[in-house]
Image (cartoon, helix red, strand yellow):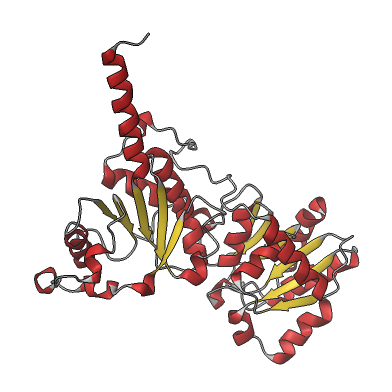
Amino acid sequence: MPVEGDILELLQQKVAQMAREMQRAVILQPGAIGDCILTLPLAKFMKDNLQLGGVDILGHTEYTGILPGRTCIDGIRSIDSMDLHRLFVEPNTFDLADRDPLINAFNDYAWIVTFLGEPNGNFEQNLIFTANCSHSSEIITLLMKPPEDFNRHLTEFYTQQFIDQSGFSLENSTARLDSAGSPLASDILITTTEADKGRGKELLKEIDFDFSKKLIVIQPGSGGQSKCWHLDNLLAVAEEAGSKDIEVIFLLGPAELLRFTKAKINDIKSVAKCLMDLSLTQVLGLLSCTDVFIGNDSGITHLSGAIGIQTFTVFGPTNPVVYHPIGPAVTVFEDRSLTFVEKPSKILQQELLAALMLLV
């Protein structure tokens, strides 16, 4: 039988474990869907190694709403729900009145990681003051963009910044890391649900999709025009795939609908079916039913990679080493020519088609 000292030690260990599991963290991520997805390895690293009871994201809910229940993120909060802009003023002019909502805004968090502001900047100083009005917490500010000469993946940049600033040691880490000490980029970061798949099937039924065929989804846009491979390339790929009895659907979001003329949209519709202006939840549903996704350096391409489907992405001006989508089935094609946006590239079309035909 265990002696009294052993029982006391076990109780102390249990209490310490419960205390750790009650601790939560929040990540302030003001970016779009791609930025949020590239934050997930950091969130998982923190959750696993700090033994946190949960990690939340404070961001734009139209991008973060799909994360709880499908990822390591436990909760979301709207970045518009609090006056964070107040934290950018000079610290000597910053003040909090009694019962100021900001005082209790971070009550639940032992760790606060922010992509807003800069290390040692006004925002960080005022955030430290605000959080410590109610409790003690660790606050770390991360840069969203790496230096020009950085030549590893962005997720490694985020994690390494956290390690450097927190003083965390990898020596006793239980996290799965690659040879460079970065969280593995081959993991599935977003697990789709049966409800997602059902939503995707309903969308496909509405456009008379033939479920006996393989499905390729192509998104021709991106947040920046300079990242968009010439549309004729994607139309050529779609035509060739269609000739092999493969179903192709073009996914057109708000950016594409603004940029493309009616004539260009008609050109797309003459080659393949289109789904337009879907919500992010609907896009997730569509992707959960997709065999292969083809896209530029865009948030939806990052989403496709993160859920683990075969993802072909074409990079032009941005560095794929740093910014490529992460996931177990991502293939990157690169065209650094000055005509990436302006002219079709038959050579790269053929490279992509050759790889595609091996899969479908």
Inspect this view and state whether residue 110 appears.
Answer: yes
The percent coordinates of residue 133 (x first, y second) are 16, 59
Query: Is 308 left, or right, of 79 in this rendering?
Result: right
The percent coordinates of residue 85 (x first, y second) are 27, 75
Image quadrant holding the C terminus, namely: bottom right
The percent coordinates of residue 76 (x first, y second) are 44, 62
Q: Residue at x 36, y 56 (%)?
A: 26
Q: Nearer the viewer, residue 188 or 301?
A: 188
Q: Nearer the viewer, residue 310 or 212?
A: 212
Image quadrant holding the N terminus, namely: top left
Residue 202 vs 171, above or below: the answer is below
Q: Nearer the viewer, residue 184 or 283?
A: 283
Instruction: Count up the numbered dots.
Output: 0
Query: Is 82 left, or right, of 317 in this rendering?
Result: left
Residue at the outermost left position: 92
Residue 326 vs 96, above or below: the answer is above
Q: Residue at x 76, y 54 (%)?
A: 355
Q: Residue at x 78, y 56 (%)?
A: 356
Residue at the outermost bottom position: 262
Q: Residue at x 64, y 61 (%)?
A: 313
Q: Nearer the viewer, residue 288 or 241?
A: 288
The percent coordinates of residue 301 (x first, y second) are 61, 63
Inspect this view and state whether residue 147 appears.
Answer: no
Query: Is 267 left, or right, of 252 in this rendering?
Result: right
Image quadrant assignment for residue 233: bottom right
